[in-house]
């Protein structure tokens, strides 16, 4: 398992080590990443669709996913509330003209990952025969995705030193990690898995395309589906609560978005919290995007 974890993490670090200047190439990488994400999610759904006894396990999966979502939500929001009390942020006044302009579009876009997985499930269950190479294809696709994401992180014009010096963003990332691991500890007797596997489940930090396929390969398609739904629901919940709490408690709004704070939920953070929230969101999202595969790889390697 340790070798597999290192093989998964190696492309991320390799991509992060390379510096690119060609804008056209970076644009092509951006679209390739988007296509790979939906392809990997469809493969995840395909594996779920071909899982024996899928219909009989749906109730169990729903209970496991609900436990993850609820316990992580309470732990994360409590930790971020304490951070806000200790080191409060003061966002700019809300931009009411643009706050709701693209909100519905973003919320609907958050449903696309669910559609990709559902398409895979239906294809695997009703249409396509069992593909013996599907798991290997998913692994290689994930490794390519991590390599491209490493390139994106390195060449996004962000200095790792400056991100680490953003104490508010760093604090949010640290609190989210620690509160997620605490939630994982509390969930060990509930989920009935070894402690390291539960902590791996709690370490997705909102990166659904990564957590779903990594957990699915290590623990089976059912747990991969639970990990995916847990993290995609984090994104959807974040879109709903950011406009409600960012005015009074910015750390809670930014932090709960997890890894998505540097990309998908960033426009909602910007429009509702102002420009002062943007560097904090990028710093916390970047650090969580980097830490998620590391934590999952390390915990899964202990099995």
Image: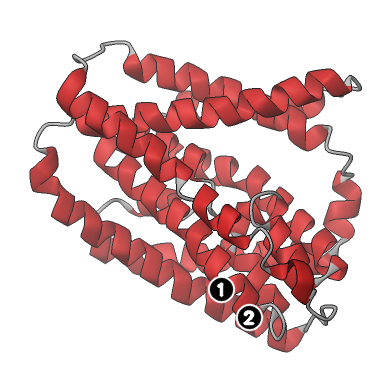
Instruction: Give coordinates of residue 163: x percent, y percent.
Output: 84, 53
The reply to whether callout 2 and callout 1 are in contact (CB within 8 Å) is: yes
Q: Vertical placement of 182 versus 192: above or below?
A: below
Instruction: Give coordinates of residue 96: x percent, y percent.
Output: 76, 76
Q: Which residue is mark 1?
A: 241
Quadrant the N terminus occupies:
top left
Question: Crowding at label 1, few (<14), some or many (≥20) Cα neighbours within 10 Å?
Answer: some
Helix or strand or loop: what does disc 1 sit on? helix
Instruction: Give coordinates of residue 266: x percent, y percent.
Output: 71, 57
Residue shown at 71% from the left, 23% from the top: 29
83 to the left or right of 207 = right
Residue shown at 69% from the left, 77% from the top: 246
Residue 20, image quadrant? top right
Label 2 – label 1 distance at C-alpha: 6 Å
211 to the left or right of 159 = left
Q: Which residue is mark 2?
A: 245
């Amino acid at each position: 398992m340790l070798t597999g974890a290192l093989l998964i993490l190696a492309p991320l670090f390799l991509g992060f080590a390379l510096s690119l200047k060609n804008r056209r190439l970076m644009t092509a990488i951006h679209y390739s990443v988007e296509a790979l994400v939906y392809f990997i999610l469809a493969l995840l759904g395909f594996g779920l669709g071909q899982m024996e006894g899928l219909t009989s396990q749906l109730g169990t999966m729903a209970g496991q996913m609900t436990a993850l979502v609820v316990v992580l939500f309470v732990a994360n929001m409590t930790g971020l509330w304490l951070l806000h009390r200790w080191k409060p942020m003061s966002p700019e006044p809300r931009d009411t003209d643009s706050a709701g302009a693209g909100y519905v579009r973003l919320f609907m876009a958050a449903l696309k990952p669910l559609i990709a997985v559902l398409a895979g499930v239906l294809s695997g269950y009703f249409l396509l025969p069992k593909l013996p190479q599907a798991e290997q294809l998913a692994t290689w696709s994930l490794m390519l995705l991590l390599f491209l994401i490493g390139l994106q992180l390195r060449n996004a014009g962000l200095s790792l030193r400056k991100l680490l010096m953003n104490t508010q963003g760093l604090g949010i990332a640290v609190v989210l990690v620690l509160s997620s691991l605490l939630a994982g500890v509390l969930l060990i007797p509930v989920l009935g898995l070894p402690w390291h596997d539960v902590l791996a489940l709690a370490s997705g930090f909102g990166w659904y395309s990564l957590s779903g396929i990594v957990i699915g390969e290590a623990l089976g398609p059912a747990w991969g589906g639970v990990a995916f739904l847990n993290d995609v629901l984090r994104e959807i919940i974040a879109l709903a609560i950011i406009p409600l709490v960012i005015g009074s408690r910015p750390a809670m709004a930014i932090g709960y978005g997890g890894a998505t704070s540097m990309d998908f939920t960033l426009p909602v953070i910007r429009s509702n919290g102002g420009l002062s929230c943007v560097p904090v969101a990028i710093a916390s999202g970047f650090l969580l995007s980097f830490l998620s595969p590391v934590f999952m790889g390390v915990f899964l390697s202990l099995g």
